[in-house]
Amino acid sequence: MMLEVEGLTVQFPTRRGILTAVDSISFSIAPGEVLGVVGESGAGKSMTGLAVIGLLEPPGRISAGEVRLEGERIDHLKHEEMRRIRGRKIGVIFQDPLTSLNPLYTIGQQLEETILTHLPMTKGEARQRALSLLREVGIPAPEARYGNYPHHFSGGMRQRVVIALALAAEPRLLIADEPTTALDVSIQAQIIALLKRLAGERRAAVMLITHDMGVIAETAQRVAVMYAGRIVEIGPVRDVIHSPRHPYTAGLMGSIPRVSSEQKQLVQIEGAMPRLNAIPPGCAFNPRCPRRFARCLAERPELLAAGASRAACWLHAAP
Amino acid sequence: MPLLKLESVSRDFDVSRPWLNRVLEREPRRILRAVDGVSFEVSKGETLALVGESGCGKSTVARMIAGLYAPTEGRIEFGGRRLQMIFQDPYASLNPRWRVSKIIGEPMILLEQKKPVAEFLRQVGLSPDDAERYPHEFSGGQRQRISIARALAGEPELLICDEPTSALDVSVQAQILNLMADLQERLGLTYLFISHNLAVVSLIADRVGVMYFGRIVELAPAAALFTRPRHPYTRMLLDALPDLGMTGKPRTPVAGEVPNPLAPPSGCAFHPRCPYANERCRVEIPRFSGGVACHAVEEGRI
């Protein structure tokens, strides 16, 4: 496994007590595999990504669990060591390409700097590599655009530059947090095709965090569905989409509008996800769940085998 | 007699650099045409959706109808007495210092007969007790419900909804879309629905106008548009949708990017990205006729 996460817990101490944003989650990603992490805002998916790359904003901290990259623990590394691993072994793509690019430097300078920091290359070699990266992510006429500043590029092109930056040092793990959310549909498809191709060709492990099930359906092999800080279902994409095992996943799938269907009314999950300081006892989904029974109110379910997937739901407990 | 009628409405924005720069650097004035000759009608009780990618001019059309911008050219006729608008961002569109009762009560100032705020809260699925709370006490979906209640309080004939669910999570979006459909049925509302999301539009719209680069390129009943799209741009948008059914059909990415509005392409604005473009498309702007503006369709090439 390229990335292994075990019992990862992220907590925020506040004046009114400790909030648990990510609650003991475990997953792994193999080389060349894309794991989709899906959930609604506040479910803890971005927090999981930030914890893996060591970019949690204090006072948030990892309070339990382990993160291993190529078998080595990276969750307790010092700031400087982690910084070297990010960029070298872990590439990161965020939603807004502008926050990942420095407006004062040309994209050529930024790529060269990243390459020279992480790889033993001369300036000339770095330039050649930067140009071939730009070509690979589909920027037309890279020589002509090399000296351009980020503001010269459109949103889709900027996101390509960010992907080129993330790939500059041949990372083993790529974390993409909503990489297509800020883009138009037509550009979205281009970026997804690109991510997919790169993961396959370079045998990198990709963690794709998004709220868009459509993006996951097309890109990922496996998907983890998060709710209130926990993984409630994890399994092969096809199984999770076509036969969801957790009532939350089922509701989520039904609430997605689709062009090709005759539906006139969407499936509706009543209520909203609980706030971190008001997570109900038992299963966190129980107040909204149409299939809850006594056990759901009292005991919190762990992930249980359910078909080809695993779901944290007492419906799948052995009788 | 339609409730709303637009006749070749256009809107220019002056995006010139400051006067001194223009004089010193000898730059001309720069005018951006955001909306170019848009015409359509909306009948009472129906939902017309305008879809398109960012920068296509759909929100500018909405704002002109609401009177927030004046059209540069063309006419807008509104056959009703009142219209209301629902905005995308439920965090920015409610005054944080006002209680919900005041927010919802505000549009009623213009009305002779005022209904109780509690009635509107109930209509959008909130509790009458929520009237005394402030916007920050609500989630995004609940805030959008408050926006809808505020819009309803003005007793509008027409509701202009500019991306009303784009900032919401998908399960909350489902709640709001169901609510809007339900309200339309009960109150006989007319919606002009602006969205970039084709799937949402397919669910809520009776008719759909597809905008590209300031113009309507195709306007058709929703069922026809989604089963038999005619304009190459509409086809591309539909092909580019994520495939949730996982039929294994690869989605066809739309090639190229939306052109720079300050340097619009000659002829049909879509021709640099269009697989069917020929010489005529490069020089002549297609006229909108029979529900579509495309030379290739007109000539029967596609």
Image (tube, grey):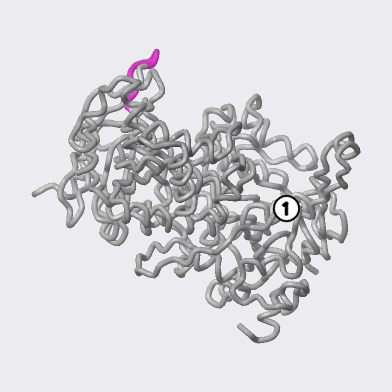
Q: Which of B185/B56 is in front?
A: B56
Whether residue B142 is visible: no
Q: Position of residue B41 (x, y in %)?
A: 75, 66
Give the extent of the magenta segment: A14-20
Q: Which of A262/A138 is in front?
A: A138
A259 vs B40, left or right, is left
Quarter of image, res B245: bottom left
Magenta span dominant secondary structure: strand
Report helix, strand or loop for mark 1. Answer: helix
Q: Position of residue A32 (x, y in %)?
A: 27, 52
Q: Which residue is mark 1?
A: B62
A249 vs B271, left or right, is left
Q: Judge the density around disc 1: few (<14), some (14-19), many (≥20) Cα neighbours within 10 Å.
A: many
Q: Position of residue A290 (x, y in %)?
A: 31, 49
Q: Amino acid at mark 1?
A: Ala
* Protein chain holding label 1: B
